[in-house]
Amino acid sequence: MEGYLLETVDEMLIEKTLAGSLECYDVLMQRYQKDVFAVARGYTRSVDDSLDVCQNVFLKAYRKLDTFAGRSSFKTWLITIANREGLNWLRTRSRKEPPNVVDFDAEDLSSGCDQETDLLETERRQRVVDSLQVLNQRSRLAVILRYFRDMSIREISAVLGCSEGVTKNLLFRSVRKLRETVTAE
Amino acid sequence: MDDCTKLFNQIADLRLRQLGDEDQTELFAHLATCRECRDLMRFHEDLSGAGGEFGEVDSEALTGVRMRVLDEIRSTEVAMPAVAKPVAFWSVDRSRLLAAAAALFMAIGGFAAGRIAAGVSPTGGDLLVATLEDGAQDHRRLRDVEDSPNIISNVAVRSVGEGRLAMSFDVARHLEIERPIDDPLVNEVLVHAILDQSSMGSRLKAVSMAASAENGKVEEALVFSMLDDPELPVRMRALEILADRPISEGVERGLMKVLRHDESMQMRLLAIEVLANGDAGGQRVLEDFLETDEAVEPAIAERLASFIQS
């Protein structure tokens, strides 16, 4: 991959992707893969499932790229697709399995921690991650985007399709609920 | 919104270094007096720390995802060019197209379209560049450039140092020809016209003219047009043209996609009609659709039922 592409703005990469450059689409995917993965992770039971959702998101985005009108940022558009794809994943699974309880694998978080302090830290983080189960999908998405992917209130509002005030309140209530859950354990 | 709610968001902004000096002062003043918010701030730190690992995934796994996506795009478009976007069609066939264009350019004095950039076959690219170089040497005035039969557009330029520029651009040349309807070049140009997003009028005309062209790629272009053209009149015309032909497997698949996904009810009803009036295979496909698809709209269900019963 040519280095200059990594610094090219999204709009230019989109234009070149539409003109046939898969290399440019790869740069776009690389740029937002962690955001998409984090959203997928909020819906799925395992890393493998999250990766499958990511794959679907990127394929869908590519096939719909010519409909991207630039009214929001590409990142917001992509995360909206990821959110929808996550919901689809849940619907598909709910037909085959019991109602979804997001079960984050403790091994994902504890691998590689040898020292006791690391272990305690990991356990605390695990409790926080586990507590995400108490939130509904919309609240969980808002928390993931804000705290795990550092997205702005404006960007999250665009993804959720609501005002910034509503997003702020949603986050406030969600974090308070998470904290109560973790503290109660 | 009460103070704690307002300051809660400032805590998050502080973490992201997005909080102004004045707001920081206000926040710290509040934290000094509010134990609840101090606890909340600590929880914010825990939450952010957990986030680092929550979204953590082996970078090779993500690379694998990207590779699979790219492979899927490539394989889908090679296998089913009819359902690919026009741009994707160009991307797949670009080098081959350029080579063909260059050969054609030599033979009849020229048509070429495509980017002179990485990926161009050496012969096609070199020939095009040589032709443009000749023109560039002959052109002395602005008018010469404006009158040039070669149209250069979509130019991207970057400096590569040592007084050199790297350029990437599209080249097109206007031609007029007259050939029989079954001439390969006529079919080729018709396909391009069907995919040309710049003019709905020429797409509509090209779709209508393609009615008498018996050619696999023309049929694929018509299916593409029926499925993906942004304008309803063009999609509708493509469907009508395809309806007058024997329904191939690819067309049948396309009609089912129309039935499932086209935003126009008129298109969906027409697709049912064409499938139902086709061979027995079409009827069977409709029956399957009625049985398996969850959300069939009443109008569609009614039309399907009427055709299936008859």
Image (cartoon, rainbow, N blue to C red):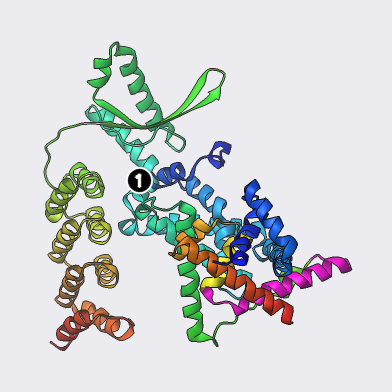
The relative height of residue A24 versus residue B79 in the rendered view (above or below) is above
Left or right of B93, for residue B37? right
Prevailing SS of the magenta stretch: helix
Question: Which residues are the magenta region?
Answer: A112-137
* Residue B7 found in image quarter: bottom right
Can you identify the residue that label 1 sits on? B90
- Comparing B174 with B31, the one in front is B31
Left or right of A27, for residue B291? left
The relative height of residue A31 versus residue A119 in the rendered view (above or below) is above
The relative height of residue B143 versus residue A13 in the rendered view (above or below) is above
Quarter of the picture holding the N terminus of chain A: top right
Residue A28 visible at all: yes
SS category of the residue bearing label 1: helix
Q: Position of residue B4 (x, y in %)?
A: 63, 66
Residue A51 visible at all: no
Q: Position of residue B2 (x, y in %)?
A: 57, 67
